[in-house]
Image (cartoon, rainbow, N blue to C red):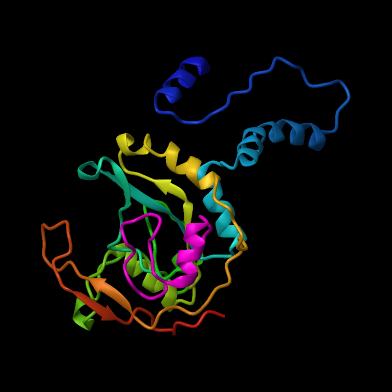
Amino acid sequence: MLRDFSNYMNVFDIKHTFVMENQPRPKIFHRIEYLAEIRNKALKPLKIERRKGRTDDVLELIYQYDFQESDFTCPLDFQAVKKKNNELEFRDSWVARDLRGEKFRSALDLLSYHPETRRRNEQKLPFQVQCSWNGVAILNPKPFYEKNPISFRRSYSDLGECSASECSLLCNDFWSRGYKRIVAVPEILVSYRLEDAILLDPVYDKALKVNRTLEEKIKYVNGPPQVICVGLDGNNRINPDQPKLWVNYTTSGTEIE
C-alpha cells in the first residue's frame, strides 16, 4: 500500500521518504533515547536537502517565521506568462506592498525599488514588507484570539476605508494591533497551477548559485507613512475597479519597536 502511495506522490513530484524497518525494540533500552532515535530518522531527508541548499518550502517558512521573529511570513507567488514564453512573474501585486507602500513589480528579480528590499531580494534573502500574502502565510495567532479578535473582513465602507483585498486588510489589522513584523521569503515560490510549478527547477538552481554577502537576519525598520490601495467596490467582479489611492493603513503608528 505504501509503495502504491509513493508512486502516486511521484506523479505529482511530491518529495517524500518512507522508512520501513523490521527491527524489534532492543531488550535493553531507554525510552526517550529510543524514541528520539526513531523520530530523528524523519529529519534525515531535511538535513540532506539543507546541505544541498534546498528545504521543504513550508518548513523553511516556519523556520524564517521563528528566526526573523516575525508576525506574518509569506513566500512569493508566481505565474507563467504564455505570451512571454512562460516567463515567471510575480502574481499577487494587488496585496503585496513594499516599505515605500508601493505595489510589488512583476519581475521576480526586481520586485521593489526600495534599496534594502532590492538588495536582499537580489540575494534571495527574506525582506521586510508592509504587506504580503502570496498563497501561504505563517501567522502569529494572538490577534485571532486576544481581546476583540480580528478576522478576515471587508472594508468599513461606512468609515471611508478603501475596499482593499481581505488579505490587505488583515495586514493592516495586524499593524493596528501592534503586530508589524511582516516578511516575504523570495527563496520560496508557490504557484496555483501544476503546469507552472514544474517550471521552477531552473529558478531554484539559479538561487542556489547566488553569492550572499548580507546577513540573513532582518533589521526591522518603520513602515511607510501610507500605502497604495486599489479598491474593489462592485459586486460580481474579480478584479479591482477603483483607481489607486494613497491611504493610511494603521491606527497605532508605523513605528516598529
User: Dividing the image into 4 quarters, which one contains the C terminus?
Assistant: bottom right
* Residue for point 68% across, 17% down: 21
The picture places residue 150, in percent across and down from the top left corner, at: 39, 69
Which residue sits at x=45%, y=18%?
A: 7
Task: Estimate the x, y position of residue 110 in percent, counting from the top left.
Answer: 38, 60
* Residue 245 % position (x, y): 22, 78
Compared to residue 147, the image places residue 252 above or below, namely below
**Image quarter for residue 154?**
bottom left
In this picture, residue 6 sits left or right of residue 233? right
- Let me know if residue 224 is in the magenta part: no
Instruction: Please tell me in which quadrant of the rendered image residue 191 appears.
Output: top left
Above or below residue 237? Residue 85 is above
Q: Nearer the viewer, residue 56 or 119?
A: 119
Which of the pair 65/105 is nearer the observer?
A: 105
- Which is the main secondary structure of the residues drawn in magenta? loop
Residue 50 visible, this angle: yes
Where residue 170 appears, as percent x and y from the top left, is 36, 67
Specify the segment rendered in magenta.
99-127
On the image, which quarter does residue 64 sit in? bottom right
Q: Nearer the viewer, residue 118 or 133?
A: 118
Q: Is residue 104 magenta?
A: yes
Residue 139, can we see it? no
What is the residue that sits farthest to the right in this orientation? 28
Identity of the residue drawn at 54% across and 65% down: 70
How many tags in the picture? 0
